[in-house]
Image (cartoon, rainbow, N blue to C red):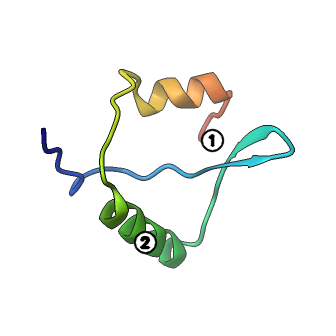
Amino acid sequence: MSVSVKNAQVTILVEIDGQVHLVAMEQEKLEAVRFIAKNSIHGVIPTGKSQAELNEFLGYRDE
């Protein structure tokens, strides 16, 4: 099965000392990472979860 990632969003998580952190980046650098991520995808595994559910799980609120 083929999945298009053209309109996909990229969320970056980094583990530091066993703790997972969301990453903030300058727009220009984020665009570069998005390009590399989308063009490097070989396959995807659906989680059945939304970005909002991930944020809630991580305790993150965009304020």
35 and 42: which is toward the camera: 42
61 versus 37 height, above or below: above
Q: Residue at x 82, y 38 (%)?
A: 18
The amino acid pointed to by label 1 is Glu
Left/right of residue 24 with respect to residue 30 in the rendered view: right
Quadrant assignment for the C terminus: top right
Number of numbered discs visible in the structure rendering: 2
- Quick one: label 2, few (<14), some, or many (20+) residues within 10 Å? few
The x, y position of residue 59, in whole percent, is 68, 27
x, y percentage for residue 40? Answer: 36, 63
The residue located at (47%, 68%) in the rendering is 33
Marks 2 and 1, how far apart at CA: 22 Å
Disc 2 marks a residue whose amino acid type is Glu
Compared across the picture, whether 18 is left or right of 4 comes to right
Residue 58 lies, with reference to residue 1, above or below; the image says: above
Front: mark 2 or 1: 2
- Judge left or right: residue 31 versus residue 29: left
Determine which quarter of the picture holds residue 26: bottom right
Q: Pointer 2: what residue?
A: 31
Q: Is residue 46 above or below residue 48?
A: below
- Where residue 47 appears, as percent x and y from the top left, is 39, 25
Is 56 situated above or below 13? above
Q: Which residue is depicted at the point 62% across and 34% down?
A: 61
Residue density around tag 1, few if under 14, some if 14–19, many if 20 or more, within 10 Å: few
Residue identifier under label 1 = 63
Residue at figure coordinates x 31%, y 66% from the top left: 39
Who is closer to the viewer here, 42 or 25? 42
Could you tell me residue 32's position as x and y percent? 45, 75
Q: Give the farthest residue toward the right.
A: 17
Helix, strand, or loop for circle 2?
helix
